[in-house]
Image: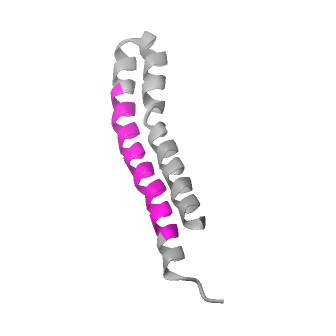
């Protein structure tokens, strides 16, 4: 059973949509996390804000997942 080239390209596109956003979120979390730990070392009351700001870049991966699902859905129709 042969698989068409278009099917493979759709899979690569969906993988890139998730992979690139995951790498971008990881880089952002690294920078934000380092700054949040530094701020919390000086002022412990900033823990809640630091935690929230560290989690925000994860929305990038959710958007990447949505785009990947849309790419796969467009190829199916």
Residue 14 included in the magenta stretch of the image: yes
- Where does residue 54 sit, x and y in percent of width and height? 44, 30
Residue sitting at x 36%, y 39%? 28
Rendered residue at 56%/61% (across/down): 72
As rendered, which of 61 and 68 lies closer to the eye? 68
Q: Residue furthest bottom?
A: 1
Residue 18 vertical position relative to residue 51 in the rendered view, above or below: below
Q: Is residue 71 above or below residue 28?
A: below
**Which is more toward the observer, 73 or 27?**
73
Q: Describe residue 21's horizontal placement relative to residue 8 as left or right.
A: left
Residue 36, position in %: x, y? 38, 25
Identify the residue at image location x=58%, y=59%: 73
SS assignment for the magenta stretch, majority: helix
Residues shaded magenta: 10-35
**Viewer-nearest residue: 24 or 48:** 24
Q: How many marks?
A: 0
Quarter of the image that includes the C terminus: bottom right
> From the viewer's perspective, is residue 66 above or below residue 9?
above
In the image, what residue occupies the spot 54% across and 75% down? 7
Q: Position of residue 42 (x, y in %)?
A: 34, 14
Task: Note whether 29 is above or below 67 in the view shown.
Answer: above
């Amino acid at each position: 059973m042969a698989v068409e080239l278009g099917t493979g390209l759709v899979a690569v596109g969906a993988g890139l949509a998730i992979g690139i956003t995951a790498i971008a979120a990881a880089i952002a979390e690294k920078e934000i996390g380092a700054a949040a730990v530094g701020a919390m070392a000086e002022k412990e009351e900033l823990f809640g804000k630091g935690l929230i700001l560290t989690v925000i870049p994860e929305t990038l991966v959710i958007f990447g997942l949505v785009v990947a699902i849309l790419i796969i859905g467009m190829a199916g129709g």
